[in-house]
Image (spheres, helix red, strand yellow):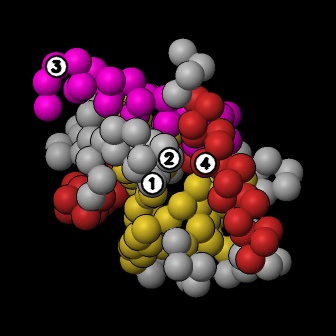
């Protein structure tokens, strides 16, 4: 990857991390002890959350760093993978490590979803599993989907994808 491509990817990561930041209204702080986390990483100490974004399509390479960061900070961690062309050629997906009282829970291959009220969710790509809402209280697990049928699911996924594509032309 040349320098120009690296800068473009860093800008894209910074843009994508804005969506979860806006959903929380929290003030981010730099992640000082990021170890092997993506360069574009911030922490939201009031919410017990670390947000990261990377042009690397494979979030699995960050799993050990996510666990170490979650343990060190006592926080949940969300890593967004976007590739070089988010939602135009590369699907945007996320991996979340949620700190529960019973231990950490890893949720992989999550997609951005916007509900009817413009709430931000991360939903399983396969349509089954746990759903994550992101808001003023941080990440919240849900056993119930934020949609009632496949059409509503598709609409929310398209709404989020279109928002991501529009963001690339905003700056």
From the image, tell me which residue sits under label 3. 3
Few, some or many C-alpha atoms within 10 Å of disc 1 (few <14, some 14-19, many ≥20)? some
Q: Can residue 101 be seen in this snapshot?
A: yes
Tell which tag, 3 or 2, sits nearer the viewer: 2
Few, some or many C-alpha atoms within 10 Å of disc 4 (few <14, some 14-19, many ≥20)? many
Q: Do tag 1 and tag 2 residues touch (Cβ < 8 Å)?
A: yes
Q: Describe the element under mark 3 as helix, strand or loop.
A: helix
Q: Do tag 3 and tag 2 residues touch (Cβ < 8 Å)?
A: no
x and y percent of residue 25 in the render?
67, 34
Q: Describe the element under mark 2 as helix, strand or loop.
A: loop
Q: Which mark is residue 87?
A: 2
Q: Is residue 116 magenta?
A: no
How far is disc 2 from disc 4 in space, using C-alphas? 6 Å
Residue 42 sits above or below residue 133 on the image: above
Q: Is residue 10 magenta?
A: yes
x and y percent of residue 117 in the render?
86, 51
How far is disc 1 from disc 2 in space, using C-alphas? 5 Å
Residue in the picture at 78% in, 72% down:
151
């Amino acid at each position: 990857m040349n320098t120009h491509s690296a800068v473009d990817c860093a800008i894209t990561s910074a843009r994508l991390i804005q969506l979860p930041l806006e959903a929380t209204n929290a003030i981010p702080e730099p992640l000082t002890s990021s170890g092997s986390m993506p360069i574009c990483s911030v922490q939201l100490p009031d919410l017990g959350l670390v947000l990261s974004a990377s042009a690397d399509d494979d979030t699995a390479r960050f799993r050990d760093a996510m666990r170490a960061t979650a343990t060190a900070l006592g926080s949940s961690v969300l890593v967004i993978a976007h590739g070089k062309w988010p939602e135009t050629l590369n699907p945007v997906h996320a991996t979340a490590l949620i700190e529960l009282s019973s231990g950490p829970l890893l949720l992989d291959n999550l997609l951005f979803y916007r509900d009817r009220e413009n709430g931000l969710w991360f939903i399983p790509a396969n349509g089954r599993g746990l759903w994550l809402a992101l808001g003023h209280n941080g990440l919240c697990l849900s056993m119930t989907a934020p949609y009632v049928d496949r059409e509503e699911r598709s609409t929310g996924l398209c709404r989020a994808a279109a928002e991501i594509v529009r963001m690339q032309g905003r700056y």
